[in-house]
Image: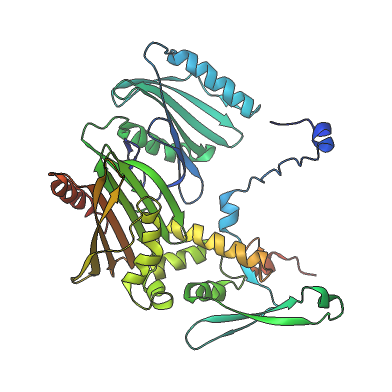
């Protein structure tokens, strides 16, 4: 049941957040880009390891403010996608690459990639550019 | 051809199911192309003695759409059409740059009311017009054969009418479907990127894939503990296992099911398919299972 604004404030109920209506075309043209602060290396096997700094938790964390490093090893497909997150490949182009290389159905690739990139962006290791990096540079007015 | 809960419709190759809810009696399905939603189909039962005229429904759809958007404009007065030999009505609406056709009719063969909506952008009208006609002309709301067709992404299966979809999930590279009829069950898994999965997770052993990816799906309905026998098979593109078991349910009037699972790797498609057919033991159960196996043999391309 929807409650008027005043009642929902009194009863402490939060209004459901409105989901922004984003055109799928816009999403397909987003270019994921790696966080330059993240150290990563690629092994001979093709797998990629991300080295992420994590703040310590618990009681001792108040005194000891140093950070510890955690290594995250991505699987084969995850590593492949990671190398394509360079700001030069759009979401659509990465989907195309997955369809081509792993014989995935387009929709399957889209859903999987969206979920994977969502996880990476929530962890702060990637973000999204509205378009390819090189195209954005071209668009910049010359000073 | 796209098939779902007893209806069939021809759609362009790059259109796929994106949302579905409901079941045989009442439900909704949305089909998208790579960029946008294109087709919405909803169905619900109706009673012959409590029937509204299509003109009345047309007015209520107009009201409903006006409620959703104040900017909606209806182009023309709408019109009539014939869909699968049924009299249908349609409305053409526009909101800013978006347009749509809503087509609705009663199917007196299976006593259902269908509502179909096709969506497109204003500048696509002339190129999309052919697709609208193609989709609507091909719509079969009642299928006369005794099998229903089910389409999920790029695979299509045919099952006897009595089978109802009881669960489905489209996880990362793993499509799971479960069907139930009066005395039988069918469980299907289609796992993509088989080479990577086998190499990284399951040491190349299909039995491991079966235990971890397929059987948990089966065990939600049938509490099978151990399989009694297994044999392997191989041809140019496929290698796999067939394992069999039986399963009893009930104490006083117990039912015994014969359960056969087939799992195979298709190198051509780089996919693993797993199919379990559980049929209640009767004198004719073997014949029925063989029929199901034949129908499901088209699963792998």
Image location (x, y in percent) of residue B193: 39, 68
Q: Nearer the viewer, residue A27 or B121?
A: A27
Residue B28 higher or lower than B151, as above or below: above
Q: Is residue A135 visible in the rendered structure shown here?
A: no
Q: Which quadrant of the structure image shows residue B116?
A: top left
Residue B132 higher or lower than B47, as above or below: below
Q: Is residue B112 left or right of residue A59?
A: left
Q: Which quadrant of the structure image shows residue B42?
A: top left
Q: Quadrant of the C terminus of chain B?
A: bottom left
Q: Residue at x 35, y 59 (%)?
A: B190
Q: Is residue B71 left or right of residue B130?
A: right
Specify the farthest residue to the front: B252
Residue A46 higher or lower than B214, as above or below: below
Q: Quadrant of the N terminus of chain B?
A: top left
Q: Is residue A81 left or right of residue A143?
A: left
Number of dots carrying numbers: 0
Specify the farthest residue to the top: B49
Q: Residue at x 20, y 35 (%)?
A: B145
């Amino acid at each position: 049941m929807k409650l008027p604004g005043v009642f929902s404030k009194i009863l402490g109920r939060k209004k459901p957040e409105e989901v922004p209506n984003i055109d799928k075309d816009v999403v397909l043209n987003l270019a994921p880009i790696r966080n330059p602060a993240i150290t990563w290396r690629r092994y001979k096997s093709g797998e990629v390891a991300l080295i992420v700094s994590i703040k310590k938790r618990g009681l001792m964390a108040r005194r000891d403010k140093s950070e510890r490093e955690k290594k995250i090893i991505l699987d084969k497909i995850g590593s492949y996608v990671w190398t394509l997150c360079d700001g030069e490949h759009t979401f659509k182009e990465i989907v195309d690459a997955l369809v081509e290389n792993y014989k995935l159905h387009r929709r399957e690739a889209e859903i999987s990639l969206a979920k994977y990139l969502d996880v990476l962006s929530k962890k702060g290791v990637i973000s999204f550019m509205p378009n390819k990096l090189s195209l954005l540079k071209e668009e910049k007015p010359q000073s | 051809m796209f098939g779902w809960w007893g209806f069939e419709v021809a759609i362009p190759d790059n259109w796929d199911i994106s949302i579905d809810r409901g079941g045989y009696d009442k439900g909704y399905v949305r089909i998208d192309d790579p960029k946008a939603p294109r087709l919405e189909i909803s169905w619900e039962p109706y009673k012959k003695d409590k029937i509204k005229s299509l003109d009345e429904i047309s007015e209520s759809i107009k009201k409903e759409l006006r409620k959703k958007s104040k900017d909606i404009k209806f182009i023309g007065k709408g019109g009539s059409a014939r869909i699968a030999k049924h009299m249908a009505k349609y409305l053409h609406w526009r909101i800013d740059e978006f347009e749509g056709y809503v087509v609705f009719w009663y199917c007196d063969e299976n006593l259902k009311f269908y509502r179909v909506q096709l969506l497109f952008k204003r500048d696509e009208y002339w190129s999309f017009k052919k697709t609208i006609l193609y989709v609507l002309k091909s719509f079969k709301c009642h299928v006369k054969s005794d099998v229903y067709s089910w389409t999920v992404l790029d695979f299509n299966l045919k099952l006897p009418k009595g089978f109802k979809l009881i669960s489905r999930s489209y996880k990362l590279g793993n499509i799971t479907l479960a069907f139930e009829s009066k005395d039988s069950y069918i469980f299907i898994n289609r796992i993509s990127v088989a080479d990577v999965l086998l190499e990284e997770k399951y040491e190349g052993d299909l039995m491991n894939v079966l235990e971890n990816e397929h059987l948990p799906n089966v065990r939600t309905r049938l509490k099978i503990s151990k399989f009694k026998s297994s044999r392997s098979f191989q041809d140019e593109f496929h290698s796999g296992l067939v394992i069999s078991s039986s399963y009893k349910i009930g104490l006083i009037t117990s039912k015994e099911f014969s359960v056969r699972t087939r799992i195979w790797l298709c190198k051509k498609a780089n996919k693993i398919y797993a199919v379990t057919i559980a049929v209640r033991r009767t004198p004719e159960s073997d014949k029925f299972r063989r029929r199901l196996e034949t129908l499901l043999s088209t699963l792998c391309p």
